[in-house]
Amino acid sequence: MISASSARSPSLPSCSPPPLTAGLIAWARDRNHALLPWMLAFETLLLAAFTAMMFATVPAADADDWGAILAGAFGAMAMGAQSALVRLLMRGIPQTNVMTGNMTQVGIETTELLLAWRRYARDPDDLSNEKEFRAVCSRLLVVLSIATGFLLGAAAGAISYAKAGLAGVPLAVLIVGALAVWALVRERRA
């Protein structure tokens, strides 16, 4: 995995990743701050704002309820921050919040695995076949682990909401906040 502190300077396409997150990454990099903890803390702040707005505006009066719209905006900003964080600081890692592309990648890598296995089974003495088979296995495991984590997280969120209602929403803030603390400890040890 790529260390957040050794990540290259981000290239900033015109529409993605979100400019605020990219700007914060550049700011933190210029000040030699540990990038991953800062960005996870930013995402935690956005999720906390989302949570506070959810509690303040429930139930939404109608589709024009500005509190609910603002809560949705903070939720979308948190998702955008997560997307930019992965894209800029974890190059080579599949997106963690967009599963359509990852599920497509699971299908592609599974097909590649079957083809690589077939080539390896036909000629096990060819080291390039073994190397390719191992590389495809590795890529498939990465995408499967992210997809599995997403599905488990979605299921846990749905169960939490079904059982506890909005009282379960702060759990997301705690999880991302704990990740920020973990990343900070990890950076300081490195």
Image (cartoon, grey):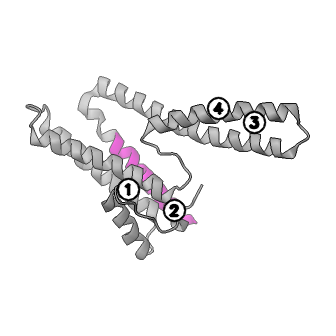
Q: Secondary structure at mark 2?
A: helix
Report crowding for label 3: few under 14, some 14 to 19, many 20 or more residues within 10 A (C-alpha). Answer: many
Q: Is residue 62 above or below residue 133?
A: above
Q: Amino acid at mark 1?
A: Pro
Label 2 or label 4, whichever lies nearer to me, is 4
* Percent position of residue 39, x then y: 39, 59
Q: Earlier in the sequence, mark 4 or mark 1?
A: 1
Where are the magenta residues, as a range?
172-190
Residue identifier under label 1: 17
Residue identifier under label 4: 110
Query: Was residue 180 drawn as part of the magenta stretch in this picture?
Result: yes
Residue identifier under label 2: 4
Q: Amino acid at mark 3?
A: Ala
Q: Amino acid at mark 4?
A: Thr
Label 3 or label 2, whichever lies nearer to me, is 3
* Percent position of residue 94, x then y: 52, 46
Distance CA(mark 2)–CA(mark 1): 17 Å
* Percent position of residue 38, x then y: 39, 62
Distance CA(mark 4)–CA(mark 3): 10 Å
